[in-house]
Amino acid sequence: MSKDSFSQDLLSSSSQPQSASAKIPIIARHAVSDRAKQTLDLVERFVEQECIPADPVFHAQLGEGEKRWSTYPPIIDDLKAKAKKLGLWNMFLPKSHFKEGAGFTNLEYGLMAEYMGKCRVASEATNCAAPDTGNMEVLAKYGNEAQKKEWLAPLLDGHIRSAFLMTEPDVASSDATNITLRIQKEGNEYVLNGSKWWSSGAGDPRCKIYIVMGKSDPNNKDVYKQQSVILVPAGTKGVTVKRMLSVYGYDDAPHGHGHITFNNVRVPASNIVLGEGRGFEIIQGRLGPGRIHHAMRAIGAAERALDWMLARANNPNKMPFGKQLSEHGVILEWVAKSRVEIDAARLIVLNAAIKIDESNAKGALKEIAEAKVMVPQMALTVIDRAVQSYGGAGVCQDTPLASMWAQSRTLRIVDGPDEVHLQQMGRNENKRGREVMAKIEKQKQATEDMLRHYGVQAKSHL
């Protein structure tokens, strides 16, 4: 079957009253190309009809015990083949900054990522899964030609996966200047010593490369030039994966979140990315888009939670106190609030995506931080309502809600905790303090002048 016929079959099989492209917010619709709208409709159908039903199959194919870390569920390859046939591949690399992607803007990808956030397998099936997306952006933007050939090419093809190693167990990693993993030059090699944890992706048997941040010049007076980023092939002598960390009890196999130690790990000097002391520059370039990608997917998780809430509220077999849940006022209030909150959060995300498109991630720091803080909190609120509507079923494995809540909760920590972003936003907003004081005083003086001009006195409104 050709790509075009497969696409048409998928689109024509839709039972939804309104396509994804028709639901693009009006304020953003003009900035979305016809090609992106068509692709968005394909993404929606692919996720709803292929990926969401595949989630339980993925988990069933993982098996039990240690097999979960050595098994590669074959359904992923089947979904990847379908995604490639549909042209749904590497949509995340924005056309304004990278030649290697599918040619979409951050705004267009944001709309697609929302649907991919509805389930476990969709992002991986389209080669748009974290941490590979951020790692590919690092290699595409900062890597040299040799590094791109060795690592970026197979990542773009979906032949291998990767991990990102920054957070450390023994320091307050929310302040990245605290990291201690040592990167020391010896001849034509670098020697690494230290430990990392929450190394997402390190458990996957297909993970072949680590992107590692450490200190190469700890005595540099500029604390933001002490760090470097280096490429470490998985399995290099001296690298030990000590354990996999769980997220509220979920192991996220085979992806996993590794606690990894480095004991005199030697890699060629050519593995340094961009040059010594450029670590912060690289990481800020990586984390900005990563934060917005997480927010995009969280919108989709909230939408799916609302779907489940509506299904429970209208289930004729579940009638508390003689009525369906949808006939109880509080449930309808939850539904209405959830719709308002999801739609508002979506606008925050799309605004950030547009700002990145118009400038870059650095030029959109405020907008990215707003989305990073607001959207996970919104998703948690909506998912919690859905959990509450199901009662006991909501917290067990019979619905996807418990897992969705656990994953969404991590987003308030990953890529910088909310408090760090709020503190920075607060500082920047507070810089307007003197300006607004002067403006208010000027307005008061204008009022006094007007009162004298008209020969009246100010009166209390009380």
Image (cartoon, grey):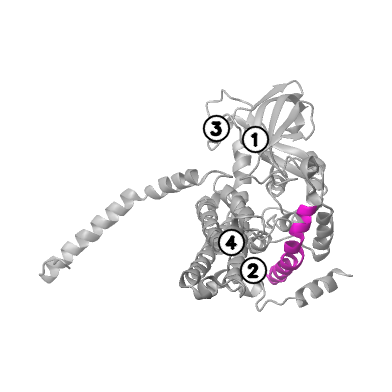
Name the residue carrying label 2: 32
Which secondary structure, mark 4?
Answer: helix
Along the horizontal axis of the image, is 416 left or right of 446? right
Of all residues shown, which one is farthest toward the right? 1
Judge whether 96 appears above or below 362 on screen. below
**Mark 4 or mark 2: which comes first in sequence?**
2
Q: CA distance from mark 4 to mark 3?
A: 34 Å
* Residue extent of the magenta highlight: 33-60
> Quick one: 335 or 285, which is closer to the camera?
335
3 or 1: mark nearer the eye: 1
Is residue 20 at least partly visible in the picture? yes
- Local packing at callout 3 (Cα closer than 10 Å; few below 14, some 14-19, many 20+) is some
Residue at 80% from the left image edge and 55% from the top image edge: 76
Q: CA distance from mark 2 to mark 3?
A: 39 Å
- Local packing at callout 1 (Cα closer than 10 Å; few below 14, some 14-19, many 20+) is many
Residue at 51% from the left image edge and 55% from the top image edge: 377
Would you identify the image quadrant in which residue 277 lies? top right
Amino acid residing under circle 3: Thr
Would you identify the image quadrant in which residue 240 lies? top right
Of all residues shown, which one is farthest toward the front? 321
Amino acid residing under circle 1: Trp
Which secondary structure, mark 2?
Answer: loop
Name the residue carrying label 1: 197
- The x, y position of residue 31, in whole percent, is 61, 68
Q: Which mark is residue 188?
A: none
Name the residue carrying label 3: 177
Name the residue carrying label 4: 302
**Mark 1 or mark 2: which comes first in sequence?**
2
- The x, y position of residue 27, in whole percent, is 54, 70
Amino acid residing under circle 4: Ala
> Quick one: 382 or 44, which is closer to the camera?
382
Which secondary structure, mark 1?
Answer: strand
